[in-house]
Image (cartoon, rainbow, N blue to C red):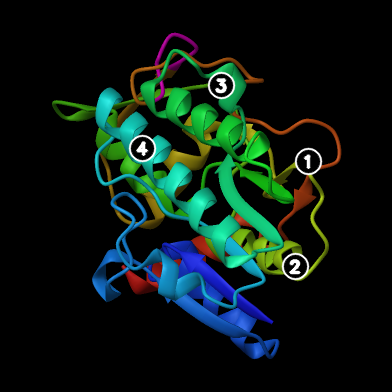
Amino acid sequence: MKIVIIGGTGLIGSELARQLREAGHEVIAASPRNGVNAVTGEGLAPALQGAQVVVDVSNSPSFEDQAVLAFFRDSTRNLLAAAKMAGVKHYVALSVVGTERMLASGYFRAKMAQEELIQGGGLPYTLLRATQFYEFLGAIAYTGTVGDTVHLSSAALQPVAAADVSSALARLAMETPRNATLEVAGPEKAPLDQFVRRFMQATGDTRAVVSGPAEGYFGTPLTDASLTPGADPILGPTRFEAWLGKAAKAA
């Protein structure tokens, strides 16, 4: 089966491409660096020719409200049109757990617009919403830095290893379309600040942490339900301590 991965050279896409190739599929890892640009439409038609499945794991280079909305709207419209022309039978896309609960954020409004376009796009589809990746805990600490302290929300989080998200996407891409939205999360749920504190300790970051329910998440307020999955998500097998041990050695 020919499977085209949009954003196929990034964190999720490169691992997804590896897994699908190992399963015996023909994989095109498409991105602007190899001449396929979903935002402009450049290179989409030849990349999708003969494809049965397209998996969109691309992300906006800018998180500014208007820029991120334009990215997801333009890229999704172009992808849907090109996929229809190519006769694609299954459109898979990666989104974010809690999208509908986080609409105070421009990024989440953009992800909701993407989801709505896919749901109404006329192609069989599967949407997979993922919780925050372990790999982005450092970015959360960086964004919450004020002087010599790190300000973090104490709301619940259930983060997941990026490789486990790629594995879930690989399985879904090889299955029949669900025409539904699924969720994937890690095996452990705890306050966000606890995950980041453990990450900081493992990487030798000794800065003080200030946490509480009033602290935001990239500027957006959180509750315990904001970024955690509902009932029966796909659970990635990688526990945080196992991932953290490898990440600390690589740092």
Q: SS of the residue at dot 3?
A: loop
| N-term-proximal mark, 1 vs 2 | 2
Region in magenta: 212-217
The dot on residue 140 is 4
- Give the amino acid type for the residue marked by disc 2 in the picture: Arg
- Give the amino acid type for the residue marked by disc 3 in the picture: Ala
| N-term-proximal mark, 3 vs 1 | 3
Q: CA distance from mark 2 to mark 4?
A: 29 Å
Do callouts 4 and 3 mark residues in contact (Cβ within 8 Å)? no
Location of mark 2 (residue): 171
Horizontal side of residue 43 vs 121, given as left or right: left
| N-term-proximal mark, 1 vs 4 | 4
The residue at 28%/48% (across/down) is 205
Location of mark 1 (residue): 180
Q: SS of the residue at dot 4?
A: helix
Location of mark 3 (residue): 155
How busy is the neighbourhood of tag 4: few (under 14 within 10 Å), some, or many (20 plus)? some
Q: CA distance from mark 4 to mark 3?
A: 13 Å
How busy is the neighbourhood of tag 1: few (under 14 within 10 Å), some, or many (20 plus)? few
Q: Give residue 94's position: percent from left, percent from top.
A: 57, 49
